[in-house]
Image: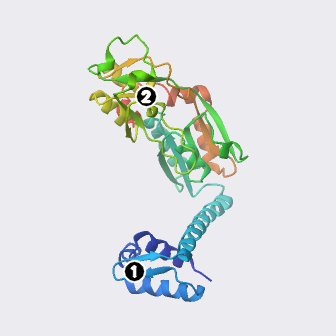
């Protein structure tokens, strides 16, 4: 029978393409790694790796073994967590994904109170953008996502194991430096053709598998892709280009005069967002989070509105 450690060793060798480096990361000697690989190849009667003097590469059989082994290791990790959850009613680990569209600093009170309530649960806070939150929830990289787009991927909506709650209205503004060529006549609306020849700054979608939603501005101008809204607004303030951002983020820069805004009615953006969770994987920790987070009115005020003096921690 193939052991879990063997699966982990094969995964590491495949990842690095080198026995010595894999051994270093696994805190083993290279000879132990080579022995394990030879042993599993002998047991299966197949060659998993092609070896040369500098590098090892997977055979087609090896690629299959690595792919399936990754799934097995993931299933084993989930089995350990769910077994503990069934026995105690509390998650061993809880992953919460924050969409880039919400106030990031608003998570800190939840973290503080959660750790008091569930000191033995390992809490993970991860960041996603656009369809990345749905992707993380669907592929079990999180149990809860805050700020997911109101446009739900078909794969998610077709499943009965997910539930969601409206977080309230979401407002957007097109912003740019006061010195940008498009900054004149701030009351006049901009059309799509006005962006031609200028840089449009967009935040990249973090979805790995599910269909990407993305930023409507990506269809126009000379596109610059950045990882978050903080970088988008800093770049815009430097005069690099124009960007579309949530109003509760833009407000920090608009009040300081670092950015100005112009209407752009042709640009389509989600006017709402959701909190969503896996209702088939609900331990005491997730249930507590849903109660603490509250209903739509509280969610809107906490996560989707300008918070005086909180810009440095809210925008990311």
Residue picked out by circle 2: 245
Which residue corresponds to the image point at 57% horizontal and 80% vertical from the top-left? 3
Q: Please tell me whether residue 233 is drawn above or below residue 60 in the rendered image.
A: above
Q: Earlier in the sequence, mark 2 or mark 1?
A: 1
**Viewport quadrant of the C terminus:** top left
Q: Position of residue 304 (x, y in %)?
A: 50, 28
Give the image location of residue 168, x and y in percent. 58, 26
**Residue 257 is at least partly visible in this image:** no
In which quadrant will I find the N terminus? bottom right
Residue at (40% x, 10% y) in the render: 187
Q: Residue at x 42, y 82 (%)?
A: 51
In the displayed structure, 8 sits above or below 107; it is below
Give 83 or 143, whichever is nearer the viewer. 143
Residue 202 x %, y %: 41, 35
Work out whether residue 163 can be spotted.
Answer: yes
Q: Position of residue 197 (x, y in %)?
A: 34, 27
Which element type, helix, strand or loop, lies under badge 2?
A: strand
Relative to residue 126, is residue 262 depicted above or below?
Answer: above
Judged left or right of residue 90, residue 229 is left
The residue wearing badge 1 is 28
């Amino acid at each position: 029978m193939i052991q879990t450690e063997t699966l982990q060793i094969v995964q590491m060798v495949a990842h690095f393409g080198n026995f010595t480096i894999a051994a270093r990361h696994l805190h083993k000697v290279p000879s132990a790694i080579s022995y394990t690989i030879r042993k599993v190849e002998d047991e299966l009667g197949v060659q998993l790796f092609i070896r040369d003097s500098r590098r090892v590469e997977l055979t087609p059989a090896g690629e299959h073994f690595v792919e399936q082994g990754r799934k097995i290791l993931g299933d084993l990790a989930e089995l350990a967590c769910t077994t503990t959850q069934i026995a105690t009613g509390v998650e061993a680990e809880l992953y919460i994904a924050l969409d880039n569209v919400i106030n990031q600093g608003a998570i800190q009170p939840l973290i503080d109170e959660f750790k008091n309530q569930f000191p033995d649960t390992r809490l993970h806070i991860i960041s996603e953008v656009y369809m990345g939150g749905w992707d993380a929830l669907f592929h079990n990289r999180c149990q809860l996502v805050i700020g997911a787009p109101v446009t739900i991927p078909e794969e998610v909506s077709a499943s009965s194991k997910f539930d969601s709650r409206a977080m309230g209205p979401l407002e957007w503004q097109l912003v740019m430096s006061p010195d940008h060529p498009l900054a004149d006549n701030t009351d006049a609306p901009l059309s799509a053709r006005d962006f031609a020849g200028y840089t449009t700054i967009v935040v990249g979608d973090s979805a790995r598998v599910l269909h990407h939603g993305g930023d409507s501005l990506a269809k126009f101008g000379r596109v610059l892709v950045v990882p978050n809204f903080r970088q988008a607004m800093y770049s815009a303030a430097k005069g690099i280009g124009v960007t579309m951002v949530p109003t509760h983020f833009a407000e920090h820069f608009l009040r300081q005069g670092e950015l100005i805004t112009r209407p752009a009615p042709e640009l389509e953006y989600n006017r709402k967002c959701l909190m969503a969770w896996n209702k088939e994987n609900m331990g005491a920790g997730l249930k507590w989070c849903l109660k603490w987070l509250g209903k739509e009115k509280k969610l809107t005020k906490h996560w989707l509105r300008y918070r005086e003096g909180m810009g440095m921690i809210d925008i990311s």
